[in-house]
Amino acid sequence: MCSHVRQMARSLSSPAASKLRAVIMGPPGAGKGTISKRMVEEFQLAHLSSGDMLRNHISKQTKVGQKAKQYLDQGKLVPDEVMLKLIMVELTQASETGWLLDGFPRTLGQGKALAEETSLSTIVNLDVPFQTIIDRVKGRWIHLPSGRVYNDDYNPPKVCGKDDITGEELVQRADDHPDTVLERLKLYESQTKPVIDFFEAKGLVKTFSGTESDVIWPQVKEYINNINFF
Ligand code: AP5
Ligand code: MG
């Protein structure tokens, strides 16, 4: 069972499960996965990470995975029709509980489809300088089955190269090569920034600026605790 499904099952069984329907946005490497991990634990949410879903499909060599691999390897965006199918199925399954979307929407087409299908509580937007991002992703390691993220400097695993929970091997992402990161940052500017503008006009975006996830996290927590989303 992949991580977001496990998390979803936990949420469904928890009496404290909230009905928050949130999106976390920000450039690649901004710390969306890092802040998401804390949000889903704190607020008992299903974590729907589009990147983790795609990497799981690629590692299992499913049809979706075979289609998506070429895009991820080049730092390009997977076509909207593939992403929309994938995410809408997950959202339907999570409709009874609170959820956090991470990595979706990323194009105006995806944003408009999401706005039509759901009533969002909020969008947490991480604003982190590009140079900080380029330095960070060099040291990133991930546990593929769960999507858990480590960093050589910031949050190293207890045992080098091994996941803290399962002891399984950690890997570096193929798309974390510096040239590919630059391509992803460019795409973020041209394709994803307009999505933020679209939701900003609806009054849904709360932006957190900074370079440290440990400083940003308490601000996000306080903000979520104080919004009325029921
Ligand atoms: P995805 O997996 O969503 O990648 P991304 O958005 O590019 O973001 P990342 O996962 O790289 O970064 P993050 O913000 O989660 O940062 P993290 O917490 O890891 O998507 C990958 C690909 O899939 C896309 O390029 C595309 O091809 C495809 N795709 C996905 N969704 C799609 C969609 N909707 N439409 C079309 N295509 C789609 O942090 C980064 C690093 O920094 C880590 O090493 C972390 O430990 C470290 N770190 C975090 N905080 C700090 C800190 N304060 N100090 C030091 N290091 C820190
Ligand atoms: Mg991520």
Image (tube, rainbow, N blue to C red):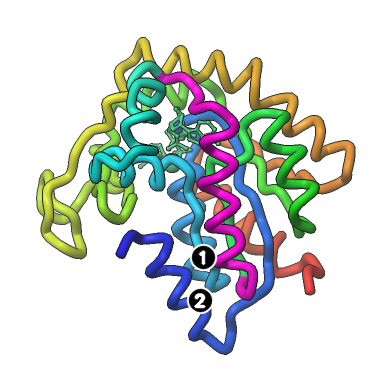
Occupied quadrant, residue 209: top right
Dividing the image into four equal quarters, which quarter contains ligand 1?
Answer: top left
| Outermost residue to the bottom | 15
- Majority SS type along the magenta span: helix
Please state, as top left, top right, bottom left or bottom right, where the N terminus lies in the image. Answer: bottom left
Name which residue lies at 42% across and 60% down: 4
Residue 21 lies, with reference to residue 70, above or below; the image says below
| Image mark count | 2
Q: Is residue 195 shown in magenta?
A: no
Q: Residues within 10 Å of mark 1 (few under 14, many from 20)?
A: many
* Badge 2 or badge 1: first in the primary sequence: 2
Q: Which mark is residue 11?
A: 2
Which portion, as a residue range, is magenta? 75-97
Could one spot residue 143 in this view of the protein?
yes
Q: Is residue 90 left or right of residue 159?
A: right
Q: Position of residue 217 (x, y in %)?
A: 55, 54
